[in-house]
Image: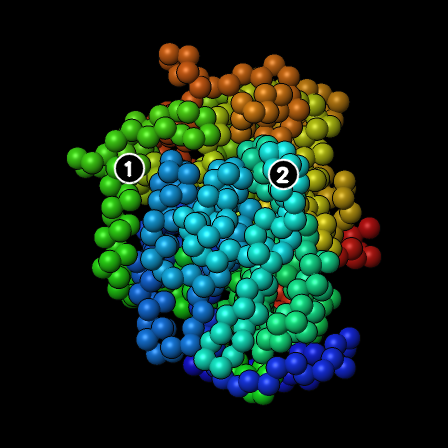
Amino acid sequence: MKIIKAITHAMLLAGVVSSMPVLAANSGEVTFIHIGDIHGHLIPRPNLRSDATGKDAGGLARMYTKIQDIRKHDKNTLLINTGDTIQGSAEAMYTSGQAMVDVVNKFGIDAFAAGNWDYVYGTERFLEFFGGNSAKAPWNAVAANLYYDGEPYADKSGRVLPPYLVKTVGKLKVGIMGFTTDRGPQVVGKTVTKGFRFTKGDDEVKEMIQLLREKEKVDLVVMISELGLSNNIRLAEMNPGIDVLLSSDMHELTREPVVTRTGTVVLEEGQDGTVLGELSVNVRDGKMAKWKFKAHNIDSQIKEDKTIAALVKEVRKSFVIGPDFKTHVNPFNNTVLTRPIDTVVGYTKVGLYRGNFTDENMPGVIEGSSHDFLADAFRAQTGADIGAIRGFRYGTHIAPGPIKMEDIYHFMPIGPMIAKGTITGQALKKQIEGAADGSLNPDPHAWTGGWLFNFSGVTMDLNPYLSKGSRSSNIKVFNKTTNTWDKFDPNANYTYASYYYQRDPEFVNVLPASNIEVLKDEQGNPLDGVEVVVRYLQSLPDKTANPVLNRIKLLQPLPQSRFGNREVQPVFGCPMTPSAN
């Protein structure tokens, strides 16, 4: 592999810590195998992005083959998983994460930083998987920024998980400090993380660097973090002393590692297990001397590991067509899965996904064909003025052609029902502007997670460089009565359709709403959101979707990449410019 860059310890410890004494003096090599943001993808999926190889991507059996190949040629390896593993598919959801754990347990993970969606099944399930010596997912979870905080854990205090661990690799002492998300999966309700408190990690990073270097006397400081690429770069540049930072959450792909001005090597591996990172580090006399990196595409050129493939088949057999299929109960809404998830339920004329780069039409941070499609389904099935969906970063890719039910579950793996309610125009404007600022603010510390909301029945212009509250303009709402696009009225009321959860009975898609009506089946039972989308597909001519795209018009192009990698979301947002005022 090509040596990309050599980093000296003097560079790494520039500035504040340049006068710190050298506390470790060992030499050797260690290779980090980095995975993250798998999001429940047990099997391969299409890859429709412009950087794709033209082959289907991902799959745990292929991923394991590559992991084992690396282990064979380098005995000094550490396998690091940086989160969002047990959510993202029907198999994961209906088993509350167990399907993924059953397979990934075989990988031999050395350290794990949990992602926000790893909390989606509740704090008790999280602790069952990752907490204590009897963890069902013994992945060595670490989190310096996760604390107990009242009921139902009033008898507990302090950190939920160990803040760090130290691994001896050959003669090297490697200190690994862990950082989980700074937020829970809010869309399913705040109660899902009741009793836990998250921080943004600023204080804890300083604490851990000092502790690892001065107390533990490690040769290498590694931060594993699900705080997202942008925030992780920010933290590394504010805190000299981190050698390697393995990141997840934003789903960005660093084919060329980001090297901060403080010398930290930062990596993020995209999403869905489509890429795996291999970072080899050479340490001399307790100092990181050089490194080399390779991003491995996990595609059909890699043979599946037979043992993992068999295990994947085993955990899927009760979900797919065949004699072992059985019904499953949705843990979020108690609806019942009555058909195999590999059943073809419709078709699409266009690829459905969200993930275009910032220099392409419809960049993922702004809009995606998958989200346009889903918003159309919610609006059509409820008869609302507006259909809406949050800017979820997770999802999958569906190529033009058949749509299977499991594809829709990859878009909607959190058990929502779909409801219509009445909202004010002011609330809609606030939602648009809040999501835009939470994705494009030039300070990543202010981000709220995810990308812009997408809508059906709404179009707008967007200037990404304006301040919060003023980025969107020329908003129009489709009038079904006159079959025209009318100017948006902030003082009007609109019917609005999106996700609904019984635990938040006065909200539709986190917006306060009145006159809420939940979609139900012919027997009066609430419908699962996936079933709503299936019914929408089957109502279309030839059961074929062909969503209208480019509903949000960018008035100015997004910023160019800062670090040489193409980006889906600008790593440091969109700064204010004089020309934008």
Question: Could you say where residue 217 lies in the image, as x and y percent from the top left?
Answer: 62, 76
Residue at x 63%, y 33% (from the top left corner) = 151
Task: Give the side of residue 354 with respect to residue 302, left or right.
Answer: right
Report the residue that reaches farthest toward the front.
155
Q: Check if mark 2's residue and mark 1's residue have beta carbons within 8 Å.
A: no
Question: Could you say where residue 497 lies in the image, as x and y percent from the top left?
Answer: 55, 25
> Residue 569's quadrant in the figure?
bottom right
> Residue 426's quadrant in the figure?
top right
Asked if 82 appears above or below 528 in the picture, the reply is below
The label on residue 46 is none
Asked if 481 appears above or below 410 in the picture, the reply is above
Numbered disc 2: secondary structure:
loop
Q: CA distance from mark 2 to mark 1?
A: 40 Å
Task: Give the side of residue 244 with respect to residue 62, left or right.
Answer: right
Numbered disc 1: secondary structure:
loop
Residue picked out by circle 2: 155
Let me know if residue 184 appears in the view: yes
Residue at x 35%, y 25% (from the top left corner) = 336
The N terminus lies in quadrant: bottom left
Front tag of 2 and 1: 2
Question: Could you say where residue 154 lies in the image, as x and y percent from the top left?
Answer: 64, 36
Asked if 282 appears above or below 363 in the picture, the reply is below
Residue picked out by circle 1: 319
